[in-house]
Amino acid sequence: MKSTGIIRRVDELGRVVIPIEIRNQFNIVEKDPIEIYVQGSTIVLKKFEPNCIFCGNNESLLSYQDKLICPDCARKIGALERK
């Protein structure tokens, strides 16, 4: 990981402000969802990107009953035979 040299304090409600320079760099705007990961003693923030529920692909997603599926998985599902 690369240090930015920026330090922020946690406020009384547990919030941390992400500096505008970093938000611009990662195209994060107000109301964007952010995922929180933990790696050992490290907290990682990542802009949320929706993925296919089967393979994790995040391109050209289709919505089916409030679930996201990529075209490749949709084709595979459509090719399944009933037993």
Image: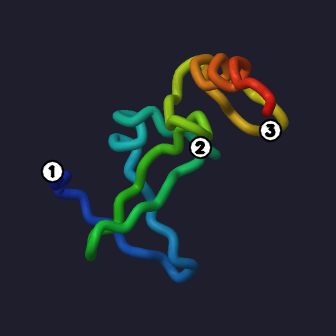
Pick out the residue farthest to the bottom.
12
Question: Identity of the amino acid at label 1?
Answer: Lys
Q: Which mark is residue 2?
A: 1
Q: Earlier in the sequence, mark 2 or mark 3?
A: 2
Q: Secondary structure at mark 3?
A: loop
Q: Earlier in the sequence, mark 3 or mark 1?
A: 1
Q: Residue at x 50, y 37 (%)?
A: 56
Q: Residue at x 19, y 52 (%)?
A: 4
Q: Which mark is residue 32?
A: 2
Q: Residue at x 42, y 49 (%)?
A: 46
Return the residue nearer the eye: 44 or 8: 44
Q: Earlier in the sequence, mark 1 or mark 2?
A: 1
Q: Quadrant of residue 50?
A: top right
Question: Identity of the amino acid at label 3?
Answer: Asp
Callout 3 environment at 10 Å: few (<14), some (14 to 19), or many (20+)? few
Q: Which mark is residue 66?
A: 3
Callout 2 environment at 10 Å: few (<14), some (14 to 19), or many (20+)? few
Horizontal and vertical percent position of residue 48: 52, 44
Q: Secondary structure at mark 1?
A: loop
Q: Residue at x 27, y 76 (%)?
A: 41
Return the residue nearer the eye: 49 or 70: 70
Q: How many marks?
A: 3
Q: Which mark is residue 30?
A: none
Nearest-to-viewer mark from 2 and 3: 3
Horizontal and vertical percent position of residue 74: 67, 22
